Amino acid sequence: MADAKVIPFGEEPRSRRAARLGGAAGTGGGAAKDAAAKRAQARGKSSSSGAGPSSGSGSGSGPHSLASVPDQPDGVEDSMDAAADALSDDGTKKTDPSSHPGVSQADAAGTNGATDATDEPRSEQEPRSGGSGWDRRLAEGFAFLRRRVTGDYEVDEFGYDKELTDQVLMSLIRPLYENYFRVEVKGIENIPTDGGALVVSNHSGTLPLDGLMMQVAVHDNHPAGRHLRLLAADLVFMLPVVNELARKAGHTLACAEDAERLLRRGEIVGVMPEGFKGLGKPFGERYKLQRFGRGGFVSTALRHGVPIVPCSIVGAEEIYPMLGNSKTLARLLGFPYFPITPTFPWLGPLGALPLPTKWTIQFGEPIPTDGYPPEAAEDPMLMFNLTDQVREQIQHTLYKLLVQRRSVFF
């Protein structure tokens, strides 16, 4: 090694150094890394020799002395290491697609491998804010108001407005149904999923809130989303405002003609044969069914061969405990009765607030009528027997529900 001439690393011509690096590239990425390791060893040796007497900085330097290798700037060494890392195993230069000015990051990710589904742009993803539901509701509300203003909605021949009933009227009654009376529904599967049917129920409560609760029970709980069309007394259609709302909600006059037209269309029709006799009976006669009329509902069911579904409602009798009836005031006002309760008329408008009783509505097993011939509707004995059968089934269910009830309010 004494005769060898060592050229300092810093003094090596740049062209020769580039040629040497090019030759190292031809031998593969491993040779480049070995060359980098040898350079590091050479630097270590030169550093150690510079500390001895043969160092260029000493007084005894001669023509054969080893010159110290000057320190390389950090940028030069880093660039050389990056050049070595950029060489692939076969000696070719690695290409980074993302470094190309015409290639986006998404294209580069597609070149190197499959992209993650979550890496798509935020604008193409679903909105993550919680206000999207409110935006949709506001849009639906404005669309509903626009149809109301322009008259772009449909009503049937009875005045029934399905859209108004579903979106407005039911929404107004539902808090009373769910939170105030806490209605429990049983036997909703006994109402057929298609075709007509006649739902027959007891009637009570001084004010006809039981009919509204039964309508919400069918609307919200039936698996087929069926609607109950109630037959109402003529007094309902004589009152201002109430008349219009009843028509919009699907109520119609309690007569055989309207009931038959609805059944022919395959509707679920609700009827309360007790009428005002059941609605305005004294509190001492609660849950005792009154006479079911002349059996006209049975005749209607027989003519169209639809099943009769008995319905029993517990809880409505106690919302306005009727202690008396002022017949004089009822005659002056044209009402069938004028109730006197513990709160009305003593507390004025506050007396009209019903008590928060716990309700149960149970739909019983349907009584089929399609097995009878058409002329059976004119048989008074058959109508009487079927009417009594429906009445007894409702009364028996009322007694059973009363025994099961823990409290009037719970």
Image (cartoon, rainbow, N blue to C red):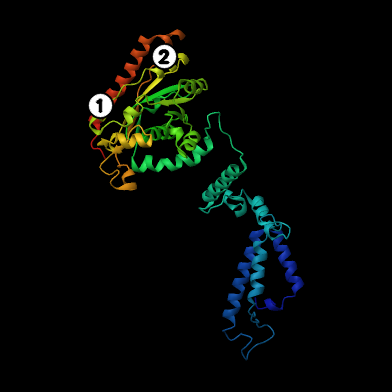
Residue 344 tag number = none
Circle 1 SS class: helix
Pinpoint residue 297: horizontal percent, then vertical percent. Answer: 41, 19
Circle 2 SS class: loop
Q: CA distance from mark 1 to mark 2?
A: 26 Å
Residue drawn where x is 30% and y is 44% of the image: 345
Pinpoint residue 240: horizontal percent, then vertical percent. Answer: 47, 39
- Is residue 315 visible in this depiction of the protein? no
Query: Which of the pair 132/186 is nearer the observer?
Result: 186
* Up-down relation of residue 143 to residue 161 (above or below): below
- Is residue 200 visible in this depiction of the protein? yes
Query: Which of the pair 100/95 is nearer the observer?
Result: 100
The kind of residue tagged 1 is Tyr
Which quarter of the figure has residue 182?
A: top left
Residue drawn where x is 58% and y is 34% of the image: 154
The kind of residue tagged 2 is Thr
Q: Is residue 396 left or right of residue 110?
A: left
Pinpoint residue 33: horizontal percent, then vertical percent. Answer: 63, 63
* Up-down relation of residue 134 to residue 360 (above or below): below
Q: Quadrant of the C terminus?
A: top left
Pinpoint residue 147: horizontal percent, then vertical percent. Answer: 60, 42
Residue 399 tag number = 1
Task: Decide: few, some or many residues near mark 2? Use Cα within 10 Å; few <14, some 14-19, many ≥20.
Answer: some
Q: Is residue 197 left or right of residue 400?
A: right
Which quarter of the figure has residue 77?
A: bottom right
Q: Which residue is mark 2?
A: 369
Query: Which of the pair 155/337 is nearer the observer?
Result: 337
Q: Is residue 140 left or right of residue 288?
A: right
Task: Decide: few, some or many residues near mark 1? Use Cα within 10 Å; few <14, some 14-19, many ≥20.
Answer: some
* Up-down relation of residue 381 to residue 106 (above or below): above
Residue drawn where x is 73% and y is 58% of the image: 102
Q: Which circle's residue, 1 or 2, is located before the other in the chain?
A: 2
